[in-house]
Amino acid sequence: MTFSTKAEDRYFEDYLPGAVHEFGSITIGEAEIIEFARRYDPQPFHVDPQAAEKSVFCGLIASGWHTASLAMRLLVDHYVSRVASLGSPGLDELRWREPVRPGDTLSLRVTVLESRLSRSKPDRGTIRSLVEVMNQNHRIVMTWKGMGIVRCRDRH
């Protein structure tokens, strides 16, 4: 399913509970994995291909935080409203389900779980979504449940 409106004109009313949206692709390379990990998550199986071969992962893997950052990029490019997003109060249930390896191509499946108007601020609502990050084999490598605050179309 795709949105009936573009991100440039997407408001609270466009996030329909039960809707499933699939989009994006981004490929991750070895140099990018190592560069990110050296800066933010310098564990041997993220930064050293030889040490990674001897690890439980039997090869280099991306930091889960790197995977989350790539997923966020896809969300901003394809899911988050460019005109009505008011940010996020957070996310729940972040899970790294399978390693992401050099050469993997990631995409997203996002299910709108709930959309609820604010009682105290009627010009906006909260969207709860299940984000599933998939690799090129459609295996789910990471999930989280996120929340976004989005302005209403006719009430801003």
Image (cartoon, rainbow, N blue to C red):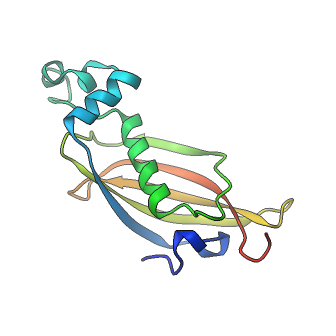
Comparing 130 with 36, the one in front is 36
- Within the image, what quadrant is residue 126 found in? bottom right
Visible in this render: residue 61? no
Rendered location of residue 7, percent (x, y): 53, 69
- Within the image, what quadrant is residue 155 found in? bottom right
User: At 27% from the left edge and 39% from the top edge, which residue is drawn?
Assistant: 99
| Residue 53 in the image: above or below residue 98 | above
Rendered location of residue 109, percent (x, y): 40, 62
User: At 26% from the left edge and 54% from the top edge, which residue is drawn?
Assistant: 139
- Horizontal placement of 118 versus 22: left or right? right
In the rendered view of the protein, which quadrant contains the N terminus? bottom left
User: At 16% from the left edge and 30% from the top edge, which residue is drawn?
Assistant: 59
Comparing 84 with 116, the one in front is 84
Visible in this render: residue 147? yes
Task: State how many labels appear.
Answer: 0
- Horizontal placement of 130 versus 64: left or right? right
Query: In the current view of this chain or complex, which residue is farthest to the right?
Result: 120
Rendered location of residue 119, percent (x, y): 84, 62
Rendered location of residue 149, percent (x, y): 68, 57
- Horizontal placement of 131 versus 89: left or right? left
| Residue 25 in the image: above or below residue 122 | above
- Within the image, what quadrant is residue 21 found in? bottom left
User: At 18% from the left edge and 23% from the top edge, which residue is drawn?
Assistant: 52
| Residue 4 in the image: above or below residue 53 | below
In the rendered view of the protein, which quadrant contains the C terminus? bottom right
